[in-house]
């Protein structure tokens, strides 16, 4: 009788674990992301904090799971970063400033060759940003496309740009070390 109860509890626990969604700072993180005909799986998710304030949840979606950020940066496979804004303190101006800093850190301040692409990318964040907004930054193997709350904002071509962009979160000098670890499933 005892073994039947233990077996039943084990089955119940396993079923609940398999169906559980990951939640980060109140945001339910989807296990899969389908966009532009690409189906991607969650690699990991984490929280971007600054001075103990939760700013956004960052989720990384890939075709093959990895714990190596450089592998994601260098890969020509489809990948996406999803940003769920969880703070009203994020404004368009602060986001653009963070993007500038991120590209400087990602490229070792060698942004001149990507200047026009970076300027175009920053333009996708000029509209008012409010708590609850969701940005998806999708690389399809050729172009980076940005969506805000499901609406396409625009695309930028080039693997060079994708590498610098994904380096903001996954590079040697990321926006947030704990967020990087979370996105890499560590």
Image (spheres, helix red, strand yellow):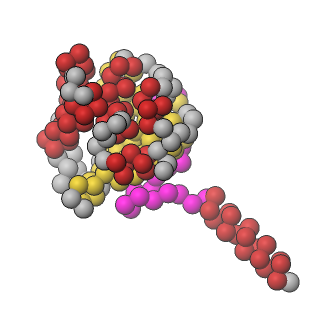
Q: Quadrant of residue 131?
A: bottom left
Q: Residue at 39% across / 45% down in the picture?
A: 180
| Residue extent of the magenta highlight | 19-37
Looking at the picture, tell me which residue is in the foreground, 54 or 129.
Answer: 54
Q: Is residue 34 above or below residue 31?
A: above
Residue 23 lies in the magenta-colored region: yes
Looking at the picture, tell me which residue is in the foreground, 156 or 130.
Answer: 156
Residue 39 in picture, x, y percent from top left: 55, 34
Looking at the picture, tell me which residue is in the foreground, 119 or 169.
Answer: 169
Q: Is residue 175 above or below residue 124?
A: below
Say whether residue 153 is visible: no
Residue 127 lies in the magenta-colored region: no
* The residue positioned farthest toward the bottom in the image shown: 1
Assign the N terminus to one quadrant of the image: bottom right
Q: Quadrant of residue 94?
A: top left
Say whether residue 38 is visible: yes
Residue 122 in picture, x, y percent from top left: 21, 31
Q: Residue at 34% across / 36% down in the picture?
A: 172
Q: Quadrant of residue 14?
A: bottom right
* The residue positioned farthest toward the left in the image shown: 93
Q: Residue at 20% across / 40% down in the picture?
A: 98
């Amino acid at each position: 009788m005892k073994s039947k109860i233990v077996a039943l509890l084990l089955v119940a626990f396993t079923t609940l674990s398999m169906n559980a969604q990951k939640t980060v700072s109140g945001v339910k993180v989807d296990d899969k992301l389908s966009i532009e005909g690409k189906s991607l799986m969650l690699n990991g998710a984490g929280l971007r904090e600054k001075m103990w304030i939760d700013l956004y949840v960052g989720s990384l979606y890939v075709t093959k799971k990895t714990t190596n950020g450089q592998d994601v940066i260098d890969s020509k496979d489809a990948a996406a970063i999803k940003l769920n804004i969880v703070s009203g303190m994020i404004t368009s101006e602060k986001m653009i400033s963070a993007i500038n800093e991120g590209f400087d850190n990602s490229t070792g301040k060698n942004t001149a060759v990507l200047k026009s692409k970076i300027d175009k990318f920053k333009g996708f964040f000029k509209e008012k940003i409010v708590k609850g907004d969701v940005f998806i930054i999708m690389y399809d193997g050729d172009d980076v496309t940005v969506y805000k709350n499901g609406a396409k904002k625009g695309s930028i071509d080039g693997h060079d740009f994708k590498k610098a962009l994904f380096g903001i979160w996954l590079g040697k000098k990321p926006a947030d070390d704990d967020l990087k670890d979370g996105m890499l499933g560590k």
